[in-house]
Structure formats: structure tokens, C-alpha cells
Image (cartoon, coloured by chain):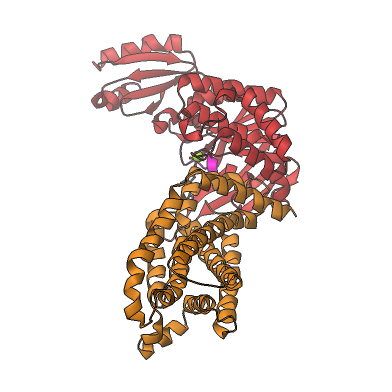
Chain colours: A orange, B red
Amino acid sequence: MKFVRDTWLIFENQMRLLLRNPVWVLVGVFQPVMYLLLFAPLLRPALQVSTDAEAYEIFVPGMLVMLAIFGGLFQGFGLIAELRAGVIERSRVTPVSRLALLLGRTLRDVVSLVAQAVIITLLALIFDLRVFLGNLLLAYLMLALIALMTSALSYGVALRVRSEDALAPLMNTVAQPVLLLSGILLPLTYAPGWLQNVAEWNPFSWAVDGTRALFRGDLGAPEVWQGLAITAVLAVLAVVWAAREFARSVR
Amino acid sequence: MIETRGLRKSFTSRRGPTVEAVRGIDLDVAEGEIFGFLGPNGAGKTTTLRMLATLIEPDGGEATIAGADLRRAPGEVRRRIGYVAQGGATWDDSTAVEELVLQARLYGVSRADAHARATRVLDAFQLSEYADRKCRTYSGGQRRRVDIALGIIHEPRLLFLDEPTTGLDPQSRAHMWGEIRRLRDEGMTVFITTHYLEEADALCDRISIMDHGDIVASGTPAALKRSIAGEVVRVSLLPEFVSAAATVLASYKTDSFEDSLRLHVDDGAAAIPDILRLLDAASVPLAGIELHRPSLDDVFLTKTGRSLRESAE
Ligand SMILES: Nc1ncnc2c1ncn2[C@@H]1O[C@H](COP(=O)(O)OP(=O)(O)O)[C@@H](O)[C@H]1O
Ligand SMILES: [Mg+2]
């Protein structure tokens, strides 16, 4: 009970600060819209599909997963600013639950990612994307789990390294191969065999395949539950690890 | 209110040697006093406070804080203390009211009560008119007052203030001293750290002097100064004459500095004519001479061989 209340308090405060600064909405939506407008039309021939709708069915889920990964991985920067301002230490002398300090923040990241995803989906509808509501909600669940995992991971690393200069290259080194080896931008169907084998080991590759199946309307595809299960397990692991970093007593 | 025995902490970094930040200290802080930790930068003051506030775990030793055992019941310690960090703890984009309400609620206070408390402390710290402004717009002194308001919003019996007046102008500092005395007069025990001699002397009921992780002296400022027998004559010289003067004045107990000597004498008024005569006879030119009664700096100097005033600057 106390834990739920504490999480809500942190979440509420973080949300208020986020909404106070509406620039993020513009940035967070502007870039994906540019992709939708300028990049997706090139895809129809590349993907060898006959309609724009089909191209969007493949491209939009990939882009949403990418946003979830990147959005999450870079949340650590905000935490480093909070560490520097002394806000985290101020919370740590109160009896507040250490897990709540983490979850309140990751929940804000999840909510803002899902809001971003909803806006992008609505815009994609204008471009003839069609998806069942139930499947869409499951896809959002997948995105939420990815954001939960990557933002928790980023917070944990931020608490370890405690400087932007160390965090930036670290997160880039993680993000680049994850992005390239997951078929996020283009499905790996046409990739050489060795690349497909490597991608097998990339959890995000499973998540992308699952999300694409959902957008395709193929709820029964094994990628769906496999993707959800893998991201759920990894999200829990990331949260447990990062919460322990919050509890650990270091400067 | 605080009792520690053999509290210690060292830091090991991957590069560089192990730093013994706190080397086994014993402290006894009584209820209702302003207790001061005086020492130069790097003495281990912040590390000690962070241990007592449950932020870092001691390597060894025992501590009881406001009746709760530091190791066995850190959660209980957190509920009973307030802690204001050296660097402050306000978020630029939040307003003072938002910060205070959040802080109170993290201690379990209800929303309505949190607002009532915020109004009360803002009033007490004369911050009401800025309450709804973002913290980034505050002056240094106002911001420091918000920090302290955050530290007492849950009405702790014991408050830790790490260098509460560092970086403040003299007027804000005097104001802050007033606030701290008021808290003490309301029954709170206040534990402050400082590297200002005047602050330790004027504000604190009792102090411990810390250096290199050890407590080198403890007591009331008056008793510590009394413990230094006699008076000090400070002879200012050009640097090239310091060693010559020290030779001439070898019959006195002398500490040499870059451009001065400190002579420990029983009766300064009697010693000064003699010192002047000796220097004159040896043709050592004098830049200045002054007599002073023992200060806390003399206590520090006697215990450590260094001057706190000079190592602070
Ligand atoms: N997290 C840390 N890691 C390594 N060394 C530290 C850490 N915190 C403090 N120290 C070292 O411990 C010593 C005492 O520091 P501190 O307690 O901050 O002193 P003070 O507050 O009296 O200025 C210093 O030498 C400082 O460099
Ligand atoms: Mg300090």
C-alpha cells in the first residue's frame, strides 16, 4: 500500500514536470511524422508490397519499437541532472520506497511513450494504416514493456556512471547494434542467413516481429506471445536491477 | 541525541589509493543543542553526516541516532531526522510549494496536511511571497532557506545541516544563524558542519574539531579557547626575513609561516617590547605586529600544526 502510494507520488511529480515543458511533445511527434511522410513512401518498392497500407503495416510497428528503445535508453540523462541537483539524495533520506523512486520515473517514461505511439498511430490511420483495436492495445503493451526495460536499464547505468559524458557513448554502443540487428527499420526477411542468425539472439528482434504480427492482424502468430514473454521477463530483470542501484548507498 | 563509537569509513577507487575519510570517531550530541563540526575541506565532515543520515553505510562502528540504531533500524532513523545536503536539493523547474508538499508526502503526510505544513514553514522562513515561483529564480539565500524548510517539513527532532552558510553573503549568513537558533529554541537538536571559525564560535553550543578523518578536540568554544594557555603575538615579516627572525626569537615558542611568525606567550603586553628590541638589535625589518587572544584557529593550530584560516583560503 505504502509502495503504491510512494510510486504514485513520484510519478505524479515527474508527470507534472514533464507536462510543464511541452517542447517534448513537439520533438517526440515531429520526427516520427517526418519518417512517416518522407521515408515510408520509399518503402513500398523496397518491401515489394503493392499498397501504402501494407508498407505502413510493416514500417509503423518497427518505428514505434525504435522509439521505445531509444526513448527509454536516453532517460538516464534526466536522472543524472537530478542526481547533480541533489534531488535523489533528498528522496533517499526519506522513508520512501526505493523501488518507488525507480518505478515512478519509469512509469512516466512509459506513459509518455504510449502517448507518443497513440499520436503516431492516429496519424498513420490517415495514411490508410488499418489495425484492430484489440491487437493495437496488445502492441502498446509490448511497447510499454520495452520502454519499461530500456528506461530502467538507463537509470541503473546512470546511477553507476553518474556523468553524461560516460552515459552517452555507453547508450549509443548499446543502441546501435540493437537497432541494426533487429530488423526494426526493415524486416530481416531479405537479410543474409548469418544476419538472421545473429538477430535470433536480439530480444528486440522478437519484440519487433511480435509487434508486426499484431499490426498485420495475426494475433495467433507465435511471435506475439514469444515477444511479449521475452520483453516482460527482461523488463522485470531490468527493474529489479535498477531498483537495487537506487537502494545502494553510494554518493 | 547522537551517540557514535568508532564510526569509520574509507573509500576505495579503482585508480588511486584508499582514502580513510573517517577514522573511527566517537560523538555525543545532547538533546536541544547546536552542535558544530568544524574542519577544513576534506576533513570528513560530509562523509560523517552522510553516514549518520543513512546515505552511506559505515565500514565499522556503532551509532544511535534519536534513539534508533543506525545499522539495525535505518528506516526508523530516516523518520526521525532531517538532512540538508551541502549542495542543496531543489529542482529548478519546481516551485517551493511543490517541493515542500512532495517532501512532506514522502514522509507519509496527507495531501491537506502537507499543504498546511508547507504554508507554515514558508511563513516561518519568510518565503511566502516567492512560494509559487520556480526555484531557479531564487537568490542563493532564499534557495538555502527552501533547502532547510525541506529538511524540517516533517518536524524531525534532529536536523543535520551540511555547511548551511557556505557561499552566502554576510547578511544572509546572519539571517541563517537566526533561523538555526530559532529551531534550537523550539526544541530541535541541530548538527551543523562548517569551515568558518566565526560560525563555530558564535553559533554553536558545542563543537568537535575534525581533521583528516579524526576528531582532534571537542567542547564548548569557550572551553576550547581557554585550554590554550597564554596569548599569541603575530609578527608579520617579508618572506625573506622569516628564518632570520625565527633565529633571533628562538627563546619563544614559535610557529613559522610564509610571511609571519606566531609566538606563544604568557603575557603579550609584556612580551611585545622584548620582541621589538630583539628584532631591532638584529636589524630585521618588521611589517607588523599584533597581539591576539586565543581563537578557535589557535586551538586548531595547536592540535594539527596548521592554521584553519589559512588552509581554508
Ligand atoms: N564517494 C567518495 N569517493 C571517494 N572519496 C571520497 C568520496 N566522498 C568523500 N571522499 C573523500 O573523503 C574525504 C573526506 O571528504 P568529505 O567528507 O566530503 O570532507 P568535508 O565534508 O569535511 O569537506 C576527502 O578526501 C574526499 O575526497
Ligand atoms: Mg563537506
The relative height of residue A123 versus residue B223 in the rendered view (above or below) is: below
Q: Magenta region, mostly helix, strand or loop?
A: loop
Q: Is residue B298 left or right of residue B223?
A: left
Quarter of the image with the C terminus of chain B is top left
- The front one of B119 and A94 is B119
Residue A41 in percent (x, y) is at: 34, 71
Residue pictured at 38% horizontal, 82% vertical: A49
Query: Is B158 located above or below residue A109 in the figure?
Result: above
| Of residues B220 and B48, the one drawn nearer to the viewer in this rendering | B48
- Determine which quarter of the picture holds residue B283: top left
**Membership of B212 in magenta stretch:** no
Q: Is residue B160 visible?
A: no
Residue B9 location in percent, x, y? 56, 51
The reply, left or right, for residue B29 in relation to residue A80 is: right
The image shows a total of numbered marks equal to 0
In the image, is residue A18 above or below residue A224? above
Taking the view exactly as shown, the residue that stands out farthest to the bottom is: A193
Picture layout, residue A220 above or below residue B258:
below
In which quadrant of the rendered image does the N terminus of chain B lie? top right
Which range is magenta?
Answer: B40-47
Q: Is residue A123 visible?
A: yes
Q: Between residues A99 and B170, which one lies in front from this camera angle?
A: A99
Q: Is residue B41 magenta?
A: yes
* Residue B184 percent coordinates (x, y): 67, 25
Residue B216: percent from left, percent from top: 55, 36
At horizontal 60% and vertical 61% (from top left) the residue drawn is: A244
